[in-house]
Every structure is written in structure tokens, then in C-alpha cells.
Image (cartoon, rainbow, N blue to C red):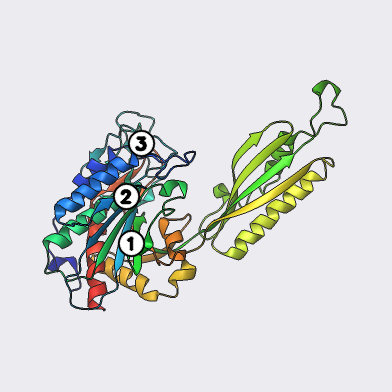
């Protein structure tokens, strides 16, 4: 089978997305619990219930907010068990409460002004992907919240594909696992994932942007923390004695590269060193950084640069001290995926069969798949169609979501065909 014309797809993916996005599932990085917010379980319970209503009897929500489900094999072949994964939480960067989705039917081009806040405009200049959406239906918010297509589009697409496979037993496939995770947006999406219970050989996150894209590479990521111990004295008698920890921290930030090595000055395969937090008082201050690069060597170079900047600054404050701590976060999944080329080959073929031109790329960020790959479950990323995520101008195309559903179905078939 080489195209979608041989399969009669009927989609409910749009209705699913509209149902899911109105549930507030923002995660909270300050919370120590798993999930970080109990409200994520509300969506998890809904998804598990919908899966059981399809006839997937083992679908359930566990105590940590993860949804597990199994679509049994209907093939006699020995087919690798594949998993489709998406996350339920939305970013804490922008409110996800009281989402009011809007649909722009038959988009004719141009900027899209959002109805509840005219200052919020989805501009073509900022969203070149809109040029490929003429005639399509665009889902946005009213401008007061994010949409949550990151990653509820992925949820809706997996759910729609699952419904299709259940209703069409003539479409042969191996055992298919479904995993929906909490807290991906705060880097804790697989902290409590039970891979033994999941029982998959390979996985795919459905959490990418432009239709047709398959991503086999992410940043490698570390967190860096610099703690500064200054010298505190009474400000009225401080001359020649005080060494202000906040000012030392500010000097370190000021000496970071101005035209390179930052998110705002890099693109493509360039990494960066990015301050994300500063706190403290006269005697002690703390700087938080994230360090990103596609290679471990690049991470080490940036961390060495940061330490050299700190040491240089400290020369001006001889009675103060600092310490720098590095915490690994995740690694480039390509290090694992290159040993299993069939995972990407099958995904690229599935995109072709869905009628799109496949494009293999890299992510300037991470996914649950980054960590899953190093936990023993190789896991690249497939497009979900989401754009301008983490913002009030987030949008997704109905037609792109439908293509994602078709890609999931074809991918399930391809693993069975090639077994």
C-alpha cells in the first residue's frame, strides 16, 4: 500500500482536540509531587475512559498521572512492539486556564487577529508555515491563553489513530502501546514511567511542529548553578570591605558573549549558554543556567567558558568565592537512534504514505523521547502540527493533524509489513 487513497480515513481528531484543550493541565516546576499538578489527572482520566470505551480494556490512569493502554496485535507475525507517546501537560510559561479555541475556516492568507485581544496577532512574518496552510482550517485561541496543541494535538492524533485501528481490524499491525505522560514541559515527563509495564521495543513521541517532519536528534542538556559567597558589612562602613554577591552575579551575566552562544543569537545546530534565574542578597547569590548543544563536547566547551568567566570576575573580588555545579538533564537521542536505523526509515515511509514529503531534522530542545531513548526505549519524534507553542498565538492546522493520524496508522502497518 503506497498512499492514503487505499484507506478510507474518517477523522474525529478536531473534536478531540477541542475537548482536550479546555481542560487546564499546566504543570508546575515548583511542585515536588508527581504529577506536579493534580489537574493533569482530570485529562488523564478522560483519556483512559475514552480508550476503554473504544474497547481497549487495559487502559488506565496510574497514581502518578500516566495513562497506559494496549491495542492487541491482529497479525500472526512476530512484530516489534511499538509505542506512541504524547504529554498531557501544557507549559507554565503562559496561562492555560479557560482556553477558548477558535477555528479559522478556509484560511485565505494574511495575519490572524485573535478575537478577545486585538494586540495578539498570528503574523505571517513570524509564522512562515502559514504560507502552506491556504485553504486549510486553523485552530487558535481567543488571544487570552495558550492553545495547548503542544501536546494535546499529539494526544488527539494518537487517540484518533487508535480508534481507526480498533474499527478497522483488516488493517494489520503488531501490538501497539500508548503512553500519555504528565510534566513533560518541566522536564519530568518520564520520571515515573514504568517501561517494564509498558513493554515496548521502540517508541515515537508525537510532539513535533511542521507536517512531514521526523526528528531523530535533540539537544544534549545540562543545568549549571553558580553560588557566590560575598562579603557582608554594614553599608555605612563598607568602603574597601564589602563585596556584594548580587553585583558579582550581575558581572558574570554581563560578561557572557553578546553576539554568540545565546538563544537569541543562535539557530540550527548552534548551542547556547542561557541564564534562567538569579536570586540572592548581599552575602550570597545564586545564578541558574541551562546549557544546550548537540554534542557532549559542545556542552563541556560552554561549561568551561562559563567557569572561565566566573573565575575572571572573581579576580576583582579577592575575598569572595564561588562554586559551580553541573547537573545532567538529558542527552541527544541520536546517540541511541543511530543504532536502530529502521525506526527512522519506517517513520519516513509512513510520512510518504500519508501523502507528504518526509523531512528528517533536529530539535532545538528536548522531548520525553530524549530520556526514554537512554532508558532503553529508542524514541524519535514525529510531527503533530503544533506551531508557536507556549504562547497566546499558538495554532495548529486541522489538515496537518489529520495527516499526523494517517502517519501513525501507516507506521503501525509498516512495522507489521516489514516484520
Q: Nearer the viewer, mark 3 or mark 1?
A: 1
Who is closer to the viewer here, 334 or 227?
Answer: 227
* Position of residue 61 measured from the top left corner of the image (x, y, whole percent): 29, 49
Q: Secondary structure at mark 1?
A: helix
Residue drawn at x 24%, y 48% is 47
* Position of residue 367 measured from the top left corner of the image (x, y, whole percent): 43, 56
Mark 1 or mark 2, earlier in chain = 2
How many numbered circles are shown?
Answer: 3
Graded by Cα atoms within 10 Å as few (under 14), some (14 to 19) or many (20 or more), the crowding at tag 1 reads few
Q: Secondary structure at mark 2?
A: loop
Residue drawn at x 24%, y 61% is 70
* Residue carrying label 1: 197
The image quarter containing residue 372 is bottom left
Q: Are marks 3 and 1 in contact (CB under 8 Å)?
A: no
* Residue carrying label 2: 62
CA distance for labels 3 and 2 = 23 Å
Q: Secondary structure at mark 3?
A: loop
* Position of residue 141 measured from the top left corner of the image (x, y, whole percent): 30, 37
Determine which of the numbered discs, if any, sits on residue 96 in the image. 3
Determine which of the numbered discs, if any, sits on residue 91 in the image. none
Any part of residue 137 in sight: no
Residue drawn at x 31%, y 42% is 41
Left or right: 283 with respect to 355? right
Left or right: 124 with respect to 290? left
Who is closer to the viewer here, 161 or 215?
Answer: 161
CA distance for labels 3 and 1 = 31 Å
Q: Report the quarter where the C terminus lies.
A: bottom left
Mark 3 or mark 1, earlier in chain = 3
Graded by Cα atoms within 10 Å as few (under 14), some (14 to 19) or many (20 or more), the crowding at tag 3 reads many
Q: Taking 84 as reference, is 78 above or below it? A: below
Who is closer to the viewer here, 360 or 243?
Answer: 243
Any part of residue 15 in sight: yes
Amino acid at each position: 500500500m503506497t498512499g492514503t487513497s487505499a484507506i478510507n480515513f474518517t477523522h474525529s481528531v478536531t473534536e478531540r482536540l477541542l475537548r482536550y484543550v479546555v481542560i487546564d493541565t499546566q504543570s508546575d516546576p515548583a511542585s515536588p509531587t508527581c504529577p506536579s499538578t493534580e489537574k493533569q489527572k482530570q485529562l488523564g482520566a478522560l483519556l483512559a475512559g475514552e480508550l476503554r470505551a473504544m474497547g481497549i480494556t487495559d487502559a488506565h490512569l496510574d497514581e502518578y498521572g500516566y495513562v497506559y493502554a494496549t491495542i492487541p496485535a491482529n497479525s500472526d507475525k512476530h512484530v516489534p512492539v511499538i509505542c506512541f507517546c504524547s504529554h498531557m501537560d501544557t507549559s507554565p510559561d503562559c496561562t492555560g486556564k479557560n482556553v477558548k479555541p477558535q477555528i479559522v475556516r478556509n484560511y485565505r492568507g494574511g495575519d490572524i487577529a485573535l478575537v478577545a485581544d486585538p494586540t495578539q496577532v498570528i503574523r505571517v512574518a513570524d509564522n512562515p508555515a502559514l504560507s502552506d496552510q491556504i485553504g486549510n482550517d486553523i485552530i487558535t485561541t481567543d488571544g487570552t491563553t495558550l492553545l495547548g496543541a503542544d501536546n494535546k494535538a499529539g494526544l488527539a492524533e494518537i487517540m484518533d489513530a487508535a480508534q481507526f485501528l480498533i474499527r478497522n481490524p483488516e488493517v494489520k499491525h503488531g501490538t501497539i502501546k500508548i503512553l500519555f505522560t504528565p510534566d513533560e514541559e518541566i522536564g519530568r515527563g518520564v520520571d515515573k514511567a514504568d517501561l517494564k509495564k509498558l513493554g515496548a521495543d521502540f517508541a515515537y513521541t508525537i510532539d513535533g511542529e511542521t507536517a512531514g517532519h521526523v526528528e531523530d536528534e535533540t539537544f544534549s542538556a545540562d543545568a549549571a548553578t553558580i553560588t557566590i559567597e560575598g562579603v557582608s558589612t554594614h553599608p555605612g562602613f563598607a568602603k574597601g570591605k564589602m563585596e556584594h554577591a548580587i553585583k558579582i552575579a550581575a558581572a558574570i551575566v554581563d560578561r557572557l558573549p553578546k553576539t554568540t552562544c545565546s538563544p537569541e543569537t543562535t539557530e540550527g545546530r548552534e548551542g547556547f549558554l542561557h541564564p534562567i534565574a538569579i536570586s540572592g542578597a548581599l552575602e550570597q547569590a545564586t545564578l541558574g543556567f541551562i546549557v544546550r548543544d548537540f554534542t557532549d563536547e559542545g556542552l563541556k566547551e560552554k561549561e568551561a567558558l562559563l567557569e572561565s568567566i566566573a573565575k575572571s570576575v572573581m579576580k576583582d573580588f579577592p575575598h569572595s568565592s564561588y562554586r559551580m555545579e553541573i547537573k545532567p538533564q538529558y542527552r541527544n537521542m541520536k546517540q541511541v537512534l543511530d543504532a536502530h536505523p529502521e525506526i527512522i526509515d519506517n517513520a519516513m515511509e509512513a510520512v510518504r504514505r500519508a501523502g507528504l514529503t518526509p523531512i528528517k531534522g533536529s530539535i532545538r530542545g528536548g522531548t520525553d523521547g530524549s530520556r526514554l531513548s537512554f532508558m532503553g526505549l529508542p524514541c524519535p519524534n514525529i510531527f503533530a502540527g503544533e506551531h508557536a507553542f507556549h504562547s497566546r498565538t499558538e495554532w495548529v492546522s486541522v489538515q496537518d493533524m489529520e495527516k499526523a493520524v494517517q502517519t501513525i496508522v501507516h507506521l503501525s502497518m509498516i512495522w507489521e509489513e516489514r516484520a
